[in-house]
Image (spheres, helix red, strand yellow):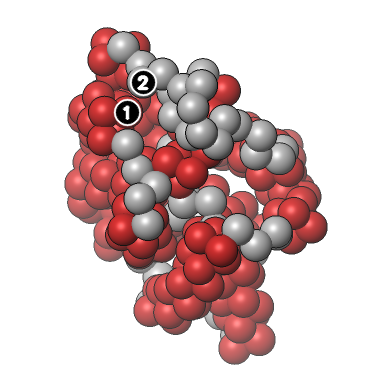
């Protein structure tokens, strides 16, 4: 990869990490969309996205939990259901002609999620889920996360808010912790995929760490990033269409 293209790739990853980090996500769906637009191969995309996910979401989980944005009674049953199924999904190697359309649909849904404003309950009016329901929801999200190379936060966050299982603030810490767990499980399910990590991964890691730190700070400060989020959503729509139809 030539230096100019690599520079553009790093800049795009840093921006994605900042935007996703602000809402407690690792950014895997955005990294996958960007890599699809840059025509990276499928065997590189999944392990790269999961590895970078751990870096950004890990920092976010630490900061959001310290800021009191977490709810253990909501997190543990969802995590219990998710981890083994994320491992299972990570161990499955879908054919390219199946993986790319599935990922395209996930990116399209992620774009919708990113463009949609957060309007969940910020205090009160919430009720933790029944443990069995939370375990089942975690299992479904974990399997999809493992199959596609995402952390599952794009599905978990809207579910938590829509079902009023917790507040919007607590959702950030729960989602970040959930993404770290799923990303580790997905990579553990297919350790061999680590051999496909690109040689320029350290540069991407530095880019997302910088973006993630900025994003988490913005998230805690409640800085508005609506316009940038919608721009990234458009990128994800385009990448999703590309993966499905090409």
Q: Is residue 199 above or below residue 144?
A: below
Q: Is residue 172 above or below residue 22?
A: above
Residue lying at 31% horizontally and 12% vertically, measured from the top left: 130
Cα separation between marks 2 and 1: 6 Å
Q: x and y percent of residue 199 in the render?
A: 38, 77
Relative to the observer, which residue lies in front, 6 or 112? Answer: 112
Where the C terminus falls, by quadrant? top right
Give me the disc on residue 74.
Answer: 1
Residue lying at 44% horizontally and 29% vertically, measured from the top left: 166
Seen in the image, is 162 located left or right of residue 181?
A: right
Give me the disc on residue 6.
Answer: none
Q: x and y percent of residue 29 in the render?
A: 54, 48
Of helix, strand and loop, which one carries label 1?
Answer: helix
Relative to the observer, which residue lies in front, 207 or 156? Answer: 156
Residue tagged 2: 128
Residue lying at 70% horizontally and 59% vertically, measured from the top left: 225
Examine the image and state in which quarter residue 148 appears: top left
Q: x and y percent of residue 223 in the render?
A: 65, 62
Q: Residues within 10 Å of mark 1 (few under 14, many from 20)?
A: many
Q: Is residue 144 above or below residue 189?
A: above
Relative to the observer, which residue lies in front, 227 or 94? Answer: 227
Residue 230 seen in this snapshot: yes
Of helix, strand and loop, which one carries label 2?
Answer: loop
Q: x and y percent of residue 114 in the render?
A: 66, 44
Residue 190 seen in this snapshot: no
Q: Are marks 2 and 1 in contact (CB under 8 Å)?
A: yes
Q: Earlier in the sequence, mark 2 or mark 1?
A: 1
């Amino acid at each position: 990869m030539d230096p100019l293209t690599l520079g553009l790739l790093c800049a795009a990853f840093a921006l994605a990490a900042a935007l996703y980090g602000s809402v407690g996500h690792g950014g895997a769906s955005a990294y996958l969309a960007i890599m699809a637009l840059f025509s990276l191969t499928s065997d590189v995309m999944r392990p790269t996205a999961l590895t970078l996910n751990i870096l950004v979401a890990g920092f976010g989980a630490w900061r959001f939990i310290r800021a009191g944005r977490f709810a253990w009674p909501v997190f543990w049953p969802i995590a219990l259901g998710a981890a083994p199924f994320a491992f299972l999904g990570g161990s499955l190697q879908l054919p390219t002609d199946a993986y790319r359309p599935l990922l395209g649909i996930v990116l399209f849904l992620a774009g919708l999620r990113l463009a949609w404003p957060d309007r969940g309950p910020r205090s009160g009016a919430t009720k933790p889920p029944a443990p069995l329901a939370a375990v089942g929801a975690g299992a479904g999200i974990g399997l999809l996360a493992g199959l596609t190379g995402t952390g599952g936060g794009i599905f978990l966050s809207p579910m938590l808010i829509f079902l009023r299982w917790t507040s919007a603030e607590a959702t950030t810490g729960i989602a970040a912790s959930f993404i770290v767990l799923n990303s580790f499980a997905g990579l553990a399910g297919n350790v061999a995929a680590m051999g496909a990590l690109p040689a320029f991964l350290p540069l991407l890691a530095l880019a997302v760490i910088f973006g993630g730190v900025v994003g988490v700070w913005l998230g805690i400060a409640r800085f508005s990033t609506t316009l940038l989020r919608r721009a990234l959503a458009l990128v994800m729509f385009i990448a999703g269409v590309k993966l499905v139809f090409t």
